[in-house]
Image (tube, rainbow, N blue to C red):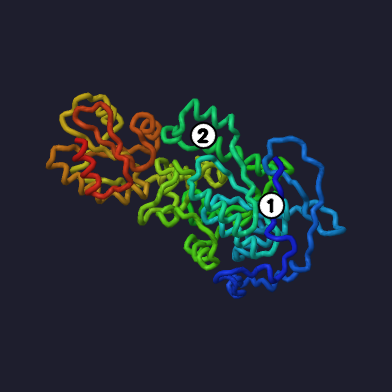
Amino acid sequence: MALAVTSSSTAISGSSFSRSGPCSDRKALQICSFRLSDLSHVSQRRYSLKAESPPTRNDSLVTRASTLITPGVEEKEEDVEDFEQLAKKLEEASPLEIMDKALQRFGSNIAIAFSGAEDVALIEYARLTGRPFRVFSLDTGRLNPETYRLFDAVEKQYGIRIEYTFPDAVEVQALVRNKGLFSFYEDGHQECCRVRKVRPLRRALKGLKAWITGQRKDQSPGTRSEIPIVQVDPVFEGLDGGVGSLVKWNPLANVEGGDVWNFLRTMDVPVNALHAQGYVSIGCEPCTRPVLPGQHEREGRWWWEDAKAKECGLHKGNIKKEDDSTTADLAPAIVHDIFESSNVVALSRGGIENLLKLGNRKEPWLVVLYAPWCPFCQAMEASYVELAEKLAVKGIKVAKFRADGDQKEFAKQELQLGSFPTILLFPKSAPRAIKYPSEHRDVDSLMSFVNLLR
């Protein structure tokens, strides 16, 4: 499917930046010391579209439908550039400067990846450069209604058409027929994301030489803490094919989330209505929920899985290999245990297996599946120990089972482990353990769970 170039304007002059609302003041358009006066060359530029012959049929959903050129100038091959060095040079640059550099460098061969959350900041920065820009988005078919309304509002605000990319209908049909609509709750989100997001993105990027994302280092300490301003994409291929054929720009890499929101409010741009309901990081409806006070924004995504796996595959290059010393599962050689209390029983592998086999237990058991290095386990230590003291007088056993390392696969298969910590109640008569479903790990919430089911 050929996708047309989406341009913020065709003949842009200084007056084209004015618009109604609080942002019509020219001073509001001066950002990070990058002035619009520096873009005076834009008003003198005129563009024309030179139609190309229809592209041959391939799997790409984002192919060039036209080429942006200046009169009398032929396109030239892109100069080979050391993007690692460029990333270092741009480390102190503002998002506006980075966006301008990206659009100037790649022209119609680059597009902004828009997911409908804070990524609207990228579109606003692109508009402020005065350069034409393209926007594409992955419609998985499972987005929130509020996200679709934001897409429409953004198109109207900026006078653009977002280039939507969709999953292959046959692949989605096969997945749903074979495994149901919500298989990801049982076996992880990777397969569904691969069908609905990764493969469509792969097809889309095959029609580009570069793409722009809204990744920030503070979004996910486990996977995004080291993203550069610009890089050769480590996972996907671009228009020319092969390793190194696609460049990835992250203009917001060094910007904190609070600063992004200050920018959005200042510029009075559309935002997703879900943000006002406690949603911070927004993806597909079944895999996104609001975060609680004090929780990190990515805790609302795939909350049933480990923090280090909270990527859908679009930014798979962020996830470190298992032999990386910084991988969360490879904890320091010496780590202090937690939940240390005379009221908390430490179960061995044999002990937890015996508990699973018992059909009629003398007393209920409450067991936490934990990893001592996990910050979420550490955060609930005090409440769990206090709970154990209260349950001791009620004849309820409270225990812990260390489920990381060699025990992790066993815990996933036999103990319903999704992420740390996982809390299980083994009633006296029920053969199967009941998993505590809530993120509330205070004493009162846990006590209510036990009292209602024991």
Secondary structure category for the residue under label 1: strand
Q: Residue at x 26, y 46 (%)?
A: 339
Give the x, y percent position of residue 144: 48, 46
Q: Amino acid at mark 2?
A: Glu
Label 2 secondary element: helix
Quadrant (top left, top right, bottom left, bottom right) of the N terminus: top right
90 displayed left or right of 446? right
N-terminal of the pair, mark 1 or mark 2, is 1
- Measuring 25% from the left and 26% from the top, which residue is drawn there? 431
| Residue on which the image places disc 2 | 191
Residue at figure coordinates x 32%, y 44% from the top left: 438
The single residue placed furthest to the right in the displayed view is: 72
Q: Is residue 99 left or right of residue 41?
A: left
Tell me the tag on residue 110.
1
Task: Depth check: give the residue in front, 290 or 14.
Answer: 14
Q: Quadrant of the C terminus?
A: top left
Image location of residue 251, percent across then percent down:
60, 58
Three-letter residue code for mark 1: Ile
From the top left corner, tell me how far across and down residue 157 is, in percent.
59, 59
Asked whether residue 330 is in view, the answer is no
Q: Residues within 10 Å of mark 2 (few under 14, many from 20)?
A: some
Q: Nearer the viewer, residue 194 or 424?
A: 194
Q: Residue at x 30, y 36 (%)?
A: 435
Residue 349 seen anywhere in this rendered image of the structure: yes
Kindly report the distance in space between the C-alpha atoms of the residues bearing marks 1 and 2.
28 Å
Q: Locate residue 121: give its quadrant.
A: bottom right
Residue 18 pos. (x, y %): 64, 70
Looking at the image, residue 322 sits to the left or right of residue 62; the answer is left
Which of the pair 76/242 is nearer the observer? 76
**How many numbered discs?**
2
